[in-house]
Image (tube, rainbow, N blue to C red):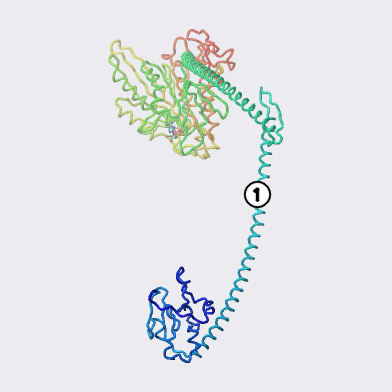
Amino acid sequence: MQGCRRPPVWSGRELVRSHPDVLTNQESHPGRPSRQTNIHRTGQATSRPSLLLTRPNENANSAKLDKKQTSVYEAGSPKFAILGPNKTSSVIWNPFRPAMELGSGVQIKGCKRKALTIPNIWEERSKWLKYEVSSKDETIKRLQAKTLELQAELKSVKEAKLHQEVELKNERDDLKVQYFKARNDCTAQFDQYMEERINRPLPGIVVVKRKAQGVCDPESLQALQEQVQELQAENLAMKQHTQILHKSFASQVEKVSLQVQEAIKENAALSLSLLEKYKREIVKRKALHDTLVELRGNIRVYMRPKPLRQSEGGVSVFSHDPYDDTVVSVPMKSRSFQLEKVFSPEATQSEVFGEVSALIQSVLDGRNVCIFAYGQTGSGKTYTMEGSLEDPGVNQRALKLLYEETQSATNMTYEIKASMMEIYNETIRDLLGSEPNERLEVKMKPEGGLHVPGLVSVPVKSLTEINRISKVAQENRVTASTMMNERSSRSHCILCVSVEETNRITGSKSKGRLNLVDLAGSERVSKSQVEGARLKEAQSINRSLSCLGDVINALKNHHPHVPYRNSKLTYLLQESLGGDSKTIMILQASSHPDNLNETLSTLSFGQRVFSVELNSKNTPSSARRPQSETPSSARKFAVPNDNPSTETGARTPTGSLVKASSVPSRLNVKRET
Ligand SMILES: Nc1ncnc2c1ncn2[C@@H]1O[C@H](COP(=O)(O)OP(=O)(O)OP(=O)(O)O)[C@@H](O)[C@H]1O
């Protein structure tokens, strides 16, 4: 600023100074020596009237002022300008560039030059002042409004604060209430817990009952703590006691389980030995029974149940003892039958033949053997005796066995002949003859013994011959379809096989005979629903079977007269039912519950036959025997008394009585005899 001329002193300084937009040099440059300079801040309010600043003395001498020399720079420039009275003395101050001095007539960038006269200046000034006043008023008003606004804001803030304080107070009060409540609850729970602990009776431990009062009270708390300690100690003691008990219990359990195991072992061993004993007993009993049967006259009764077909459904009426095959039970009727042998329903043809083959072999020793199948119609008699070509029955197997046995003999020669007949409606028919002879009769040979004159007898010389015999017989046999059996045999069929043995060395001869009888099926006429010729057949069959029963009954009851001649069947079987012939009756019975009555009837019949006793003292007069076959001690059928405890028994061939009581009876079996 050195070298610069001293700035002029401006009139109306206060006014100018009071203008908010006018800054002194001191204000714009603090610390600098005051220059009596008005600085007009341009560019701040373009709407305001431009400010003209002149020297008072020059204003006073305005006449001297050259209009042209007066330069006014209108606001609008971003810079600051200080106006001088003429262009030469005009000084432009730029607060950002303080030392700058501009010459007159220099256009300030951004300012518009405007030439004004003095009156104009004063007019402008008055306008300015008015503006200033109004502006101040506005400012005052604005400030007042602002003050009101702020006061209102302050008031609302105060109110909000007050409200907040109230809320906080309420919240605090709530929390206090909750806190006290929780504390009281805890105390109450603790009191209750302690009360329970104190009152709980402990076995073997004395419990001092204390009331937990005022938990917060140090004394009570102390008491409670003591009690807790006591209880803990008791608890520990109880735990130890429990552990001891547990250990002793475990050892006791171990001990007892060992004892139980030993007992089980002992029992198992005992039951095993009992089972063994039982089995040995059965074997013994069977052996004794065999002896008894031998003494009884070699009548053996077997039973073969017909298995249930899958399509039939239902449950078998039979119950079998797996250890004893001489007993069959019918649980539905709580009855048990003791027989020679009870086959299982699954028994094969070969198994059945295996049981009778030994007896068949005895024919080669000159014995008379009769095997016949008895039972209800459809119960499997023909199946057992004839079987099928693929799985033949007893007939064909017997012929085959005899034939094969004779083929392997060295010093003997055998002649086997087979004849076959049926008894149909009390008429004997030849089944092997080319023309069926229906007028055959049973005759007594002059030398003794029965025969059927005219009956065709076929020599058995090959296995093919055996097959042919079976085939022809099957074709010739009278069969019919009934409700009970699709192909029912309506006659009794008898295959007679005679075997004559000649000793090549001695020339001696012996003759044995095998009768294989397939009886016609018994049936209840009402059940089989037959009529006409079928009805007559059925009646005839039933009559002849009834005659068979009568014969057996007479034998059993020691009747002096045995009615053999009442039917062709009994007449023909006379020799097989008496004397020294060996007889096997195979009872055929259905397993189906529908046939229960017939099954029971069959079993009862078999049981009666089984109980027939051979007694040489009771030879029925009508049972005449062929001279050649009658043994010196002629043995006849006799039936034991119904009271088994006193009289059931059998005589040995020498006549001594074998007491039934000495024969072990099967355990748990109700004897039917
Ligand atoms: N043990 C068995 N196993 C399988 N099927 C059998 C058995 N026994 C019998 N059958 C069958 O039962 C049916 C009737 O048998 P079968 O003709 O032998 O009876 P039946 O007693 O001779 O009758 P009927 O007295 O009326 O002649 C046949 O189809 C036969 O194959």
* Image-quadrant location for residue 558: top right
Front-most of 184 and 493? Answer: 184
Q: Does 413 sit above or below residue 539?
A: above
Q: Quadrant of ligand 1?
A: top left
Dot 1 corresponds to which residue? 175
Q: Amino acid at mark 1?
A: Leu
Q: Does 122 sit above or below residue 540?
A: below
Front-most of 242 and 237? Answer: 237
Front-most of 75 and 509? Answer: 75
On-image quarter of the N terminus: bottom left
Percent of width and height locating residue 75: 45, 82
Crowdedness of circle 1 by 10 Å Cα count: few (<14), some, many (20+)?
few
- Residue 672 visible in this rendered orientation of the protein: no
Q: Residue at x 45, y 24 (%)?
A: 572
Q: Secondary structure at mark 1?
A: helix
* Image-quadrant location for residue 600: top right
Total tally of numbered discs in the picture: 1
Percent of width and height locating residue 621: 52, 16
Percent of width and height locating residue 430: 40, 30
Percent of width and height locating residue 179: 65, 45
Front-most of 551 and 100? Answer: 100
On-image quarter of the C terminus: top right
- Mark 1 Cβ and ligand 1 under 8 Å apart: no
Q: Does 4 sit above or below residue 276?
A: below
